[in-house]
Amino acid sequence: LPETMAAFAAAKLAEETGKRVLLLSANDLRATHDADDGQQLLGTRCACLPGGEIDLTRGASSHESAWRRLETLSRVTSGEVSLLCTSLEAAVQRMGSAKRFAAQTIRLALGDVIEPAELIRRLESLTSRHLAGQLQRQVLVSNRIKTMNESIYYNVDSLHNAMFENRQVQFQYFDWGV
């Protein structure tokens, strides 16, 4: 099969079987061309996931590319994409070690019980150090009635974020006279 026909064959396979297809190309340029070809048959159900470029400028184009990648990944995970075209390099960038994945997989069956601290520890091992620090935000208030005012939870979350980011917090106090 000629390289230029791969996208058409993959799109037809996705259309006929109803399954999602991943088409790996030699490079990002070829993957972009494959996605263009696939869109002729599948329309928006075909997407291209480009590899990540090295951010030297922190310019708008880099942020735009990152947003496009995130949007594509979101569409893939929501099931909107039947054919995903990407380069081998881009696919490898997004894959972790199979052994690490298997070791870190959290499987719970109906009725299983896991302590919150253990679950948080496992989740921390799956993310970056920066994000792992945000998981250690447990607030325990005993012998209190649960509040119906949900804004309290958002305020506590804002305070946790401020503390985590080492930011100053300002409060406004009011006296209510009845």
Image (tube, grey):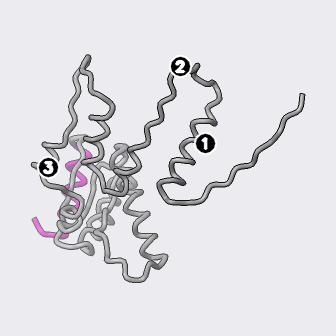
Residue under the point 70% across and 50% down: 171
The residue mark sitting in front, 1 or 2, is: 2
Tell whether position 169 is magenta.
no
| 80 shown above or below 150 | below
Q: Position of residue 148 (x, y in %)?
A: 63, 24
Residue under the point 34% across and 58% down: 47
Q: CA distance from mark 2 to mark 3?
A: 41 Å
Q: Which mark sits nearer the N-terminus, 3 or 1?
A: 3
| 165 shown above or below 3 | above
Residue type of the residue flagged with mark 2: Asn
Q: Which mark sits nearer the N-terminus, 1 or 2?
A: 2
Residue type of the residue flagged with mark 1: Asn
Q: Which residue is mark 3?
A: 100
Query: Residue 143: which numbered mark, if any?
Result: 2
The residue mark sitting in front, 3 or 1, is: 1
Name which quarter of the figure residue 22 lies in.
bottom left
- Specify the segment rendered in magenta: 1-16
Q: Which residue is mark 1?
A: 155
